[in-house]
Amino acid sequence: MRYVERVLEQLKAKNPGEPEFHQAATEILTSLEPVLSRHPEYEAAGLLERFIEPERVILFRVPWVDDKGCVHVNKGYRVQFNSAIGPYKGGLRFHPSVNLSIIKFLGLEQILKNSLTGLPIGGGKGGSDFDPKGKSDAEVMRFCQSFMTELCRHVGQDTDVPAGDIGVGGREIGYLFGQYKRIRNEHVGVLTGRGLSYGGSLARTEATGYGLVYMTAEAMKCRGDSFEGKTVIISGSGNVAIYACEKAQTLGAKVVAMYDSNGYIYDKNGIKLNVIKDIKEVERGRIKTYADRVDGAIYHEGCKGIWAIPCDVALPCATQNEIDEASAKLLVKNGVKYVGEGANMPTTLEGIAVFQKAGTVFLPAKAANAGGVATSALEMAQSSSRLFWTFEEVDRKLKGIMESIYHNMDEAAREYGMEGNYVAGANLAGFKKVAEAMMAQGIV
Ligand code: NDP
Ligand code: 2IT
């Protein structure tokens, strides 16, 4: 049996009930065949078996007390997946759906994403099944303090540096940082996405969304095309979606639809982003209210219908498996030309196959959303040097990183005879450095 098939079979047998982890591993490992046949020494060194097994999985209890005095217990996770090229780095997700399978898929993706940035960061991910929605600031604070009381013994500025993800933004990072500092008595860059008054980097808030659009714009430029006049659909209305919308609009696109987990809004005149920012960033409200505030906008209950809206560019920016085979077929039928993944693994394996068959330019998550973690690494560099860079300086570096990731994955795909297959290109380009570092460091 071929090496990849054997490792995938073992992975499924040893990790039952982890469908998202199986999905991400299948996408990655099946792309790596060509590099494995060029390097038979990798199999002899058990490289893939080690690559797909986290170095460390930390599971812990997170007890906290709500405003009424009731005790709640959530699960806490940190998967320290791979430190071959740098300290573990990756976000924390607070969402009721969080489980070990989801954290492991995110951690596995993160290893290759972080490698693609060209910066010295390993892969990790964590989170909790805690739902911040509907909780008071005081409840969120107590939860974050309890979470960090355990996590603080496992992380550190040179060991493991968490950041935000779904349900973890500036407010949560602030509470987590405060508790770390209190227990460890260290004001260090142990988390990224910090506020600007206590060590954060300018442009980190915007970085994932801007980075996604920079990469998509580069793919367009290479085809003599641009965002100017394009119709764009963006799923989600959180951090990534909002700043993807902002940059796409700046480049002349018309964004006509966005959603949250209840439903989507369609605004044929183009989304008014200041209204979305008010609803989501200021009020922590529901997107439904957009239709009450903007003439001509329509709200639809449920998310799926968003993919039936004709567009040139689709930027899924909410969560995993948002675009299944049927949604991908609808997008293709309606003429989509570019799909850029802002979320992690938003397209199912069957959905990806539809885009690839149709010749859609498909920019996979681990490349297209790498701008967030790349800017986190720039925040780490600023923390270590105790200096701050201007917004323009960080933004310029971010743009350069996104363009070079695009060209690296494009070249890797060509090198292995799969021109235009950026799923393979991103996996091959990301894996190269991790594999070399793991081989150099012996069987560890
Ligand atoms: P936020 O919490 O800021 O926003 C998440 C958005 O997605 C919200 O609009 C939320 O709606 C929606 N959403 C979440 N879960 C679901 C669901 N099951 N069905 C429908 N909509 C859903 O998170 P981010 O913007 O930070 O993250 C979005 C995606 O981008 C994630 O996949 C994350 O892993 C990825 N990512 C984030 C990075 C970052 O720097 N923040 C970096 C790289 C990737 P609602 O409010 O109703 O829950
Ligand atoms: O998925 C991701 O890359 C993130 N959530 C950002 C991680 C980070 O460390 O900035």
Image: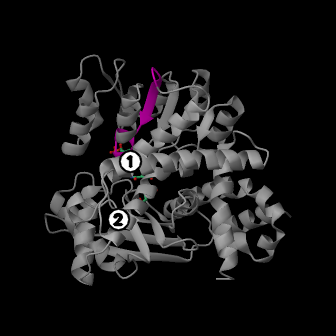
Q: What is the secondary structure assignment of the residue under circle 2?
A: helix
**Relative image position of residue 311 (x, y in whole percent):** 50, 23
Q: Residue at x 42, y 77 (%)?
A: 158
Crowding near the residue tagged with mark 1, few <14, some 14–19, many ≥20 C-alpha atoms within 10 Å: many
The one of 166 and 412 positioned closer to us in this rendering? 412
Q: Residue at x 65, y 80 (%)?
A: 441
Residues under labels 1 and 2: Cα distance? 14 Å
The answer to whether residue 208 is visible is yes
Q: Is residue 167 shown in magenta?
A: no
Give the magenta range. Answer: 228-242
Question: Residue 313 has which mark?
Answer: none
Q: What is the secondary structure assignment of the residue under circle 1?
A: helix
Quadrant of residue 219 within the rendered picture: top right
Quadrant of residue 290 within the rendered picture: top left
Q: Amino acid at mark 2?
A: Gln
Quadrant of residue 388 within the rendered picture: bottom left
The answer to whether residue 71 is visible is no
Q: Amino acid at mark 1?
A: Asp
150 left or right of 195 in image: right
Question: Residue 382 has which mark?
Answer: 2
293 left or right of 316 in image: left
Question: Total marks drawn?
Answer: 2
The one of 319 and 342 positioned closer to us in this rendering? 342
Q: Is residue 233 shown in magenta?
A: yes
Question: Residue 395 has which mark?
Answer: 1
Seen in the picture, residue 207 relative to 304 is either above or below; the reply is: below
The one of 81 and 62 positioned closer to us in this rendering? 81
